[in-house]
Image (cartoon, grey):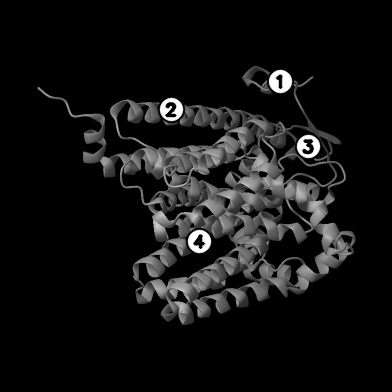
Amino acid sequence: MKFPSLKQLLEEHERLILALLCVVVFLFFALITHWTPVSGDDWVYAVGGTWNSPFSETLLMYRTWSGRVLSELWGFLVAPHKGLWNLLNPLLFTLIGVLLVVLTEEKNHTVLSACFLFLMMLSVGNRVRMQTYTWIMGTTYVIPLFLFLIQVFLLKRWVIRNRLTKPAWILLCLLNFCIPLYMENAAALICGADVLVLIYLWWNDRRKVGKMAVLTVIAICGTLIILLSPGAAARLANDNAEFQALTLTQKILQNWPSFLSHMYTESRGVTTGFFLMSAGWAFAHRAHHKSLYLYILVTLFALVVHQGILYLFLTFWLIGNLIAMEEIKSERWFPVYLILCALGANLVMLVSPIFDSRSGLYSLYLLILVSGVMFQSVDCGNKIKRVTLYVGVLVLLGVRMVSYYDIYHMVHLINIRRNQQIEYYRVRPDAGDAWLLAYPDESIHSANVQEGDDTHMYYFKEYYYLSQDLHLVFYYLDDYNADTIFAPSE
């Protein structure tokens, strides 16, 4: 009896395996989402959305605080209902993973590519993970990423394959209007991405320029709504007056280290995967351009020294290599488009007074997508190579999943202990000092309230129905494990 090879098994059951992988991704994110408590700004929006109309609160925020209309509305609608978010968050990341796989258009090793992309998703830096993967208000960065990937999928079908149905056109119009209403750099991303497609069409298919121009105008209209918010202007003038007083050059110089960090060095796993795949792509095409050997050597050196400025230089070098590759014709333009979008999404933040890790989410995922596209260059031609790749990717994926599990299981145990403490002080409003167990740094975002943070202190007490007269003290442990977490308080 002849047993089927690994390749035959994967090809015969590819759809079933991919469906099972989607289930694994969903359940994995569902678990860590369930274990993560409401924290930081979530308390503010949960209280506001519970006792007031989400729509009136959104309008008030537009006038007084932020032009992020759909982000504000999300907060007031979802933060009061964590059970709803426990379903929406894993669904979002599962669909993002599906879109990444679809956009890479893998033909030879789709299952391996899907596992690789999931590994890359779990390889973002800790601060990005904390601020976007398991934070209700951080999901306002994830939603526009998901919507932008849908836009990329639809545009690719239209621009490259001439497939554009009426429902797809209406959806593209809605996406171009809605995405800017979530976040400023999401607005810049979609406007810049539209302009890049316009340039491409001007040189390759001018019949489509008119429709693309309409989409660009719609995106600009959405961007103007967020930029012209009275609340955003007031916030800039009051809370960020010192930054606004800087010259353009001074703003760029101040934010330049953050750009290099959030783009490259902070998420070392993503950066390593991206440049290893670019080196693999260069190796696969070395016969056409001997200079690619030098690119491979410099890339390997850069991964050792891990310097942002060298990574930036390599990124532009990669773009130049792709453009020069006449042999792959139109296939080169898609990764070039994605890399330019990734750079633009972070470069625009150089003039922002607030440039935190979560703002780099779009750039990181576009680099992940390019990594997936270039993963096609990996040679799986023989059994040994195929098995080696599968084992390597699956082992690394397992390590990352266990790492996430350890972090969020610890968070789960702390949740139980903190909820016990909160319940104790809820029925003792005159206790004076309320000692609450703190979450370790680099675990979850904004779950501990710092002294002097009056806003979050107030809303933490309101969310948990604690007396405003209590003085909250968040204490840390030297070591976090089940024994120390549940040890009796002294």
Q: Amino acid at mark 3?
A: Arg
* Total number of numbered discs in the rendering: 4
What's the residue at 77%, 70% (across, down)? 231
Looking at the picture, which amino acid does disc 1 mark? Asp
Estimate the x, y position of residue 358 in percent, counting from the top left.
Answer: 66, 49
* Residue 124 or residue 2, whichever sits in front: 2
Residue on which the image places disc 3: 428
Query: Which numbered disc flags the more N-terminal residue, 1 or 2?
Result: 2
Which residue position is annotated with label 2?
392
Label located before the other in sequence (2 or 3): 2
User: In the rendered structure, which disc, 3 or 1, sits on the residue that comes first in sequence?
Assistant: 3
Residue beneath the point at 57% across and 35% down: 297
Q: In the rendered view, would you say 435 is above or below 375?
A: above
Task: Please tell me which residue is depicted at 62% across the width and 68% down the height of the picture.
Answer: 181
Q: State the residue in front, 150 or 191.
A: 191
The reply to whether discs 4 and 1 touch (Cβ–Cβ < 8 Å) is: no
Q: CA distance from mark 2 to mark 3?
A: 54 Å
Rendered image: mark on residue 479: 1
The kind of residue tagged 2 is Gly
Q: Label 3's element?
A: loop
Q: Amino acid at mark 4?
A: Leu
Which residue position is annotated with label 4?
147
Q: Secondary structure at mark 1?
A: loop
**Residue 171 is drawn in which quadrant?**
bottom left
From the top left corner, tell me how far across and down residue 157 is, in percent.
38, 65
